[in-house]
Image (cartoon, rainbow, N blue to C red):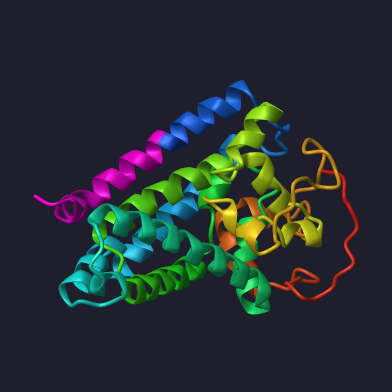
Amino acid sequence: MTFNDFALANEPAIRLAAFFGILALMAAWEAVAPRRARLHSRTVRWTANLGLVVFNTVLVRLLFPFAAVAFAVLATQRGWGLLNNLALPDGLVLVLAVVALDFAIYLQHVMFHAVPALWRLHRVHHADPDFDVTTGARFHPIEIVLSMLIKFSVIAVLGAPAAAVLVFEVLLNATAMFNHANLKLPAGVDGLLRLLLVTPDMHRVHHSMDVAEANSNFGFNLPWWDRLFGTYRATAQMPQKSMAIGVQGLTGDPRCVSLTGMLALPFLDAGRDYAIGHAVEVKHEAP
């Protein structure tokens, strides 16, 4: 059995095991060394956030007859994409595909901030008043569907093999939960990790209520793209423990911590939205 065959046959089990394993590890770590005090109980937020994860998972399985890994197998069989038409070693193809997929996610993330209509979807993720491991999986269903379509397009153009797609999705899921976790890392460790990985302190800046800060640090996995394209911001203006997290105009809104509220949020007038290239005056609010 090839690595691609193994990926296709075991994709659901591998992703499920990775999700719950990392979730449990990050939750335990948060309990031992939290970075910030919680504004809401885990019971309230986790019920909503994880409920949204379940809803999205069922929706994706219903709308798409096969997952990204199966689509990658189809692309390989039909010779679609750049990497399927180059004579390169399998190991190099896997590394190139994982890095290219990560770059595509960075660009997609920037786009969801740059286009106001897409930002209205993406603000469901940013409207979480707390910042912890479940925030990393909290996305509106329409954003998830659009992300799947974008992912399929990238796989077809790139010609990413199934094994690379599985490795990328497991890595992205794991790092998203890590860098959204409410963790306190020593400054030296954080600095070293930022050379290869987006850390919680780095990504938390992206969830600041300050517009300029929210439009920085777009990476989920690799930190290189932010540095390369000038979107990296080392620190927020306010200390990590007291910086205001969330979306301007939604502070204290109970819909931000309920499943039905999150589903409705993109279609509600929540005040002044922001997008890249649109200057908005933002006042700092106490958390």
Question: Going by the picture, which residue comes out furthest to the left?
Answer: 1
Q: Is residue 20 magenta?
A: yes
Residue 185 visible? The answer is: no
Residue 218, position as x, y percentages in the image: 62, 58
Residue 164 visible? The answer is: yes
Picture mark count: 0
Question: Residue drawn at (68%, 28%), measured in percent from left and top?
Answer: 188
Q: Is residue 192 magenta?
A: no
Question: Going by the picture, which residue comes out furthest to the top?
Answer: 32
Left or right of residue 182, residue 53 in this image: left
Question: Residue drawn at (16%, 52%), measured in percent from left and top?
Answer: 9
The part of the image, by quadrant, that contains residue 130 is: top right
Question: Residue drawn at (48%, 67%), measured in percent from left and top?
Answer: 104
Q: Quadrant of the C terminus?
A: top right
Image: magenta residue range: 1-21
Front-most of residues 254 and 156: 156
